[in-house]
Image (cartoon, grey):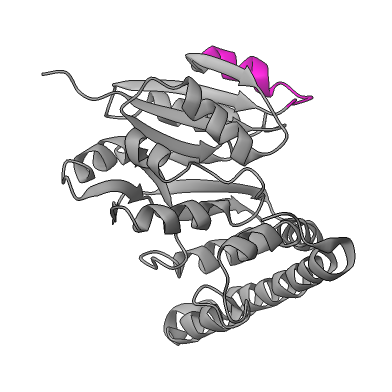
Amino acid sequence: MSKPLVSVIVTSRNNADTITNCLASIRAQTYQSIELIVVDNNSRDETPVIARRYADKVYNLGPERSAQRNFGAAQATGDYLFIIDSDMRLEPRVVEACVTAVQDPAVQAVIVPEHSIGDGFWAKCKSLERSFYVGQDTIEAARFFGRNIFEQAGKYSEEMTGGEDWDLSRRIAQLTRIGRVDEFILHDEGRLYFGKTLKKMYYYAGNAVAYFAKNPTTSALTDQSGPLARYKLFFSRPGKLFARPLVGLGMLTLKTGEYAAGGLGYIKAKYIVGSPRA
């Protein structure tokens, strides 16, 4: 009996430093019935050249990852879609575990937990932060989908460049049960810098206005995945938070800085620039 085909879709933009490890990890999966698709967004480095060494199909499309993902899904021929970014790599049994999970007819989408890796002090802080999110359905989002459920849910919202993973998972959860696996995605943060991290949060929070327009909440501050809920989660495990005191304090500092930058980006986009069309 033939195994179902899994189309792994990788979005990229100027990721020459990480895409080799990403694509090599996909080719090294214990589950071999894989179609590998890369959708690049006008990279100016060697990303497309590297992609062509590993991928079955390589395309160029912008402007942002939601459009890239939907385009890749449209080109895919697999029964299942697994969508990741090019700064991620997969542990060897990830795809196999996902295919096993969806053998339950009630499950047609799967969460794969993430572990951050990288260089330097702030990367250690980010790794600690992400470790708190494992098993948290309100924070983690599905990345592996049955093709039919992906299309039925309406795919990724292309007006979003922030929160689009949660938005799709919320819509899918209304249609099917979302499962999870114990294998990990390794998210390569590289060398993380405090200022650049805050700048990135400012950018994505500014684009999150569309997410909250489609997923209204009484307050972004008190939302179940918002700042107060996350601080509560961090302090619910003080032994873990302060096992390495400097890293724990650094993580809280970094997260607080991200929320401050994100708040400024959100306020600017919503009240100064103007809300995008929902």
Q: Is residue 64 above or below residue 240?
A: above
x and y, in percent, of residue 196 in the image = 79, 56
- Residue 76, by quadrant, is top left
Counting labels gives: 0
- Residue 199, by quadrant, is bottom right
Q: Residue at x 62, y 76 (%)?
A: 220
Residue 249 in sight here? yes
User: Quick one: quadrant of the N terminus?
Assistant: top left
| Residue 59 vs residue 134, the one in the foreground | 59
| Residue 83 vs residue 273, the one in the foreground | 273
Q: Residue at x 50, y 57 (%)?
A: 166
Q: Is residue 125 above or below residue 1?
A: below
142 magenta-colored: no
x and y, in percent, of residue 201 in the image = 72, 61
Part of the protein shown in magenta = 42-53
| Residue 89 vs residue 203, the one in the foreground | 203
Q: Is residue 231 above or below residue 150?
A: below
Left or right side of 4 for 232: right
- Residue 16, by quadrant, is top right
Q: Is residue 60 above or below residue 216?
A: above
Residue at the limit of the structure toward the right, as seen here: 272
43 magenta-colored: yes
